[in-house]
Amino acid sequence: MQDDAPKLLSSGNPQIPKGDGEGPVHAYIEAMPGWKRGVGERLDRIVTQSFPAVRKAVRWNTPLYGKEDGWFFSIYCYRNHVQLTFMRGTDLVPVPPGASKVEGVRYLNIAEGDALDEDLLTEWITQSARLPGVKLW
């Protein structure tokens, strides 16, 4: 019997084919290992509730969330944490804590057992959706 479950990359991230819409994003979330899956489900729910018109896609084994003019948020699994990427994070109030080498980008890393401040995440997603999106390709 063949195992059709997505493989994990060496970083711990699920390997999911490129695609647009709910299907590929939900396939990614389903493949998130262990405790990370619950975090992915909560994040997807927060984004969808905060910005119901959200566009979803998977590129580079990464779920992306955006709108007509580009992307504003993504998630990525690492072995010990889930990384949230805010494409225009330096424009958010308060600014997410993780610096990036990419201008404007900020990160928030969530490790196992970390409390998820849903109110703050909702505020950041709402702010992000109001800003111009970022073109990635």
Image (cartoon, grey):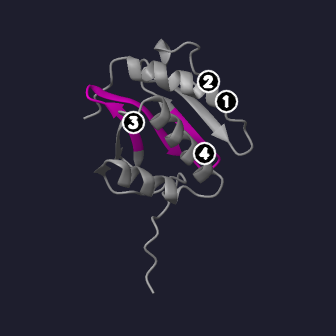
Taking 87 as reference, is 115 above or below it?
Answer: below
Q: Mark 2 points at which residue?
A: 120
Say which residue label 3 marks.
65
Instruction: Give the mark, 4 or 1, whose residue is nearer the N terminus.
Output: 4
Image quadrant in which you'd find residue 108: top right
- Across and down, in percent, residue 26 comes to 44, 53
First along the sequence among labels 3 and 4: 4
Residue reaching furthest to the bottom: 1
In the picture of the structure, the residue carrying the numbered disc 1 is 117
Q: Where is residue 132 in the image (x, y as percent from the top left)?
A: 33, 18
Tell me the quadrant of the picture where the C terminus can be found. top left
Q: Earlier in the sequence, mark 4 or mark 2?
A: 4
Q: Is residue 64 magenta?
A: yes
Disc 2 residue type (three-letter)? Leu
Tell me which amino acid carries mark 3: Tyr
Residues shaded magenta: 63-84
Q: Do the residues labelled 4 and 1 touch (CB within 8 Å)?
A: no
Residue 39 — which label?
4
Which residue extends farthest right?
Answer: 113
Disc 3 + disc 4, Cβ < 8 Å: no
Amino acid type at circle 1 is: Asp
What is the CA distance from the residue labelled 4 to the residue labelled 1?
11 Å
